[in-house]
Amino acid sequence: MGAISRFFAAAVFVLAPLPLGSIDLAWICFWNFLLVCSLLTADLSAVSRRNGMLLIPLAAMIATVGVMVALQMWSIPAAQSATVWELPRQLFGLALPDRLSTTARGPWLAFGSVLLLSLAFARAVILASDASDARSLLRILAWAGCLYALYGILAELFAPDMILFRQKEAYLGFATGTFVNRNTAATFWGTCALLFLVPLLRTMHRQDGGPAAQPGWRARLEQMLSAPVALGTGFTICTIALAMTGSRAGLLLSVGTFVLAIILYLVPLELGRSRKWLVLGGSAAAGLVLLQLVGGLVAGRIVEHGLIDPQRLAAYEASLGIIADHQLLGVGLGNFEAVFPAERPTALGSLGIWDRAHSTPLEIAVELGIPAFIVIALASLWYFYHLFTGSLHRKRDRYIPVIGASVAVLGVAHSCIDFSLQIPGYGVFFAAIVGCGLAQSLPSHMRKERGKSVQVELS
């Protein structure tokens, strides 16, 4: 049962980006079902008490969102002040429900995406509590991402007007892979590139050239996929696909997190003060060189449109106004698209549909209110603390929390100015990597060891 459980989990993590980012409700329900089955049959023998405690903030976030959704759907006196109901009441005398949510089913349907990311995160933490399973999971995700990147490159070269078997309607001339939005695709491929970059640093740093070959095809395959040439090839493919998206924020933030990953990995090593300053300068220089090499499309868009989008700033300002009017309970989970047209500023003009705030933190505050946003923010900061602590202080397999911390920074930073984490296909992939890094962020003596010999490998 343990092998089947791990297979279900890995299948969800790998396949979620495939059906156009799994934005359809049917896919969200299907992935939720598979993850529930995987959790119910999971092998918990490698999960220590400290690993289990890592899930407490996640449980607090889910409980907070669930309570808020229930309050938003419940008929309460406070709902009578919701402005969305006042106009039809006054003009037409309609007996409308006294609830905060603008839509009747929006919050419950939107809760499915929240549940999916939470289940993916929890399953990754449990699965990656064993170090060998964590290494295998990251390797699988890396090469799956490389295949997605290779498809995105080939599709843009030979079928630029198609996404899988559908006609491409937007972002013509830019690679999007299996995603509709190029910014989400850029963040996804930047994440995949990190899955190759950090193990490549580890392999280059090791003095013994890696583990000796072991009998069996699986061990030989793992050694081949972990070779510097293979890791460098995967990183190059993912970076080329990233550049072909033409996403300004996606490329700039990805390169920034490449530099962050290099610094997180190298700084704890005993290099001496002068060499550490050399590492910092060299990492920044490497990032600038990489931007020059792959940033042609992005540079053209920056010259033409600049770095700051005035329309997004206007949308952010309008979102802050909605937050000010609904500070405690929000407008209802998943209701931003229904509420925003009434608050849409004239600066946005009449073109374009703003179904998202293009800032996940702002949208959370709009839909759930400030108290719920604070709970989610504090839990996220707690996870960031553990990821960075593990990246700087662990000895064995330190590259795993380094990957988790770097991917966490990339995904959250990009979602502050866009909505990549709100796309389930990327959100599940992101949650799996961050959960894996978090599970291995604790020192070895705090995690339960299985009854087998473990080879000590300095990161």
Image: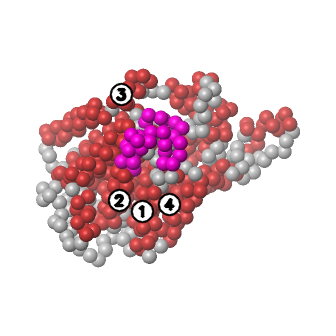
Q: Which mark is residue 10?
A: 1
Instruction: Check disc 4 and give the amino acid type.
Output: Leu
Magenta residues? 148-174
Comparing labels 2 and 4, the label whose residue is closer to the camera: 2
Magenta-span inclusion, residue 18: no
Instruction: Check disc 1 and give the amino acid type.
Output: Ala
- Residue carrying label 3: 299
Q: Earlier in the sequence, mark 3 or mark 2?
A: 2
Cβ–Cβ under 8 Å for marks 1 and 2:
yes
Depth check, front residue: 212 or 417: 212
- Residue carrying label 4: 119
Instruction: Check disc 2 and give the amino acid type.
Output: Ile
- Give the CA distance from mark 3 to mark 2: 33 Å
- Give the CA distance from mark 1 to mark 2: 8 Å
* 10 Å crowding of disc 4: few (<14), some (14-19), many (20+): many
Q: Earlier in the sequence, mark 1 or mark 3?
A: 1
User: In this rendering, is residue 291 above or below 28?
Assistant: above
Q: Earlier in the sequence, mark 1 or mark 2?
A: 1
Q: Is residue 208 left or right of residue 11?
A: left
